[in-house]
Image (spheres, helix red, strand yellow):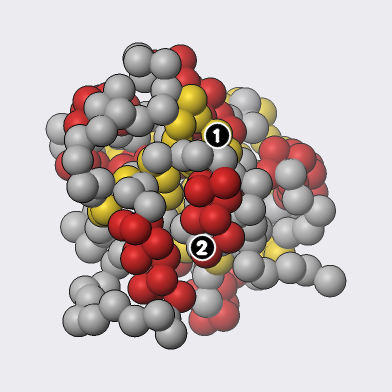
Amino acid sequence: MKVRELIRQLELFAPLNLAESWDNVGLLIEPSSDGNVNRILTTIDLTEPVVEEAIKKQCDFILSYHPPIFNSFKRLLQKNAKDRIVMKCIAKNICVYSPHTCWDSVNKGVNDWIASCFTCSSKIPITPNSTLQNAGMGRIITLAAPLSLNVVCDILKTHLGIKYLRVGHADHDCWAKRHISTSQQYEIIKTIGICAGSGGSLLKNVDTDLYITGEMSHHEVLAVVAEGRSVLLSEHTHTERGFLSSAAKFLQSKVEGGVEFLVSEADRNPIETI
């Protein structure tokens, strides 16, 4: 399959107009000719080990969720790791494409994958997209049956494949004030706001019992618990990494032309809990 046709099919799943205005999505490194794509390596982050893996596995296309090129370049130097990544991909004629917030926004994308571990009676985007139904940034879900915070934690850890979560517990008095009309018990969760990656700005003032995201700043968490809400933080890429396998299988079934999708084995969370 030619590069341009592959990109066309990728964008049928997640159109580029779903991306946030600040993002840098789409084709980032174009090969010198519109050659055939036979093998695609999917990754969350495009690091030097991932590039070497792509070369070793004879991949001619890297689908990197996070854009490896974000800020402008004034020069490309060997002393800079990001520069070396770009230069190596160009030298090896490897195409690089990033979907990032397109995948966050699209229906059946990253945020829907996070929500899929819960049985919901409703699910809507936090900021709906004006052009595509059921798309938009973040998700607000209403659980089919209320769950304790501890049960929510267990479900989420299993789904994300991790052992630990950081928990910000809602202030008791503020929780009681939020639920004064219903007397909902402390940290019995009915509604959840979800944002893959870093959710501090998107989740701000979203009226749910719990926020689930990868990371928030110290002061953002202070504000959330003072509003009578709880928050679960899994680390940034844990909210995204598990989606890669699902995405690779889905795209393998949708993209025509015998292209093979692989999930990177060299890609990993740069932060380890010890």
Task: Specify few, some or many for label 2: CA neighbours under 10 Å numbering under 14, 14-19, or 20 or more.
Answer: some
Q: Is residue 178 above or below residue 111?
A: below
Label 2 belongs to which residue? 47
Tell me what residue is drawn at x 76 percent, y 40 percent: 158
Q: Is residue 252 above or below residue 136?
A: above
User: Disc count in the image?
Assistant: 2
Q: Can residue 191 be seen in this snapshot?
A: no
Residue situated in front as seen by the camera: 50 or 204:
50
Q: CA distance from mark 2 to mark 1?
A: 16 Å
Q: Is residue 4 above or below residue 183?
A: above
Rendering coords of residue 148 (x, y %): 75, 44
The quadrant of the image that shows the C terminus is: bottom right
Tell me what residue is drawn at x 21 percent, y 74 percent: 72
Label 1 belongs to which residue? 262
Task: Specify few, some or many for label 1: CA neighbours under 10 Å numbering under 14, 14-19, or 20 or more.
Answer: many
Rendering coords of residue 43 (x, y %): 51, 47
**Amino acid type of the residue that numbered disc 1 sits on in the rendered structure:** Leu
Tell me what residue is drawn at x 50 percent, y 29 percent: 261
Element marked by disc 2: loop
Residue situated in front as seen by the camera: 146 or 135:
135
Q: Quadrant of residue 258?
A: top left
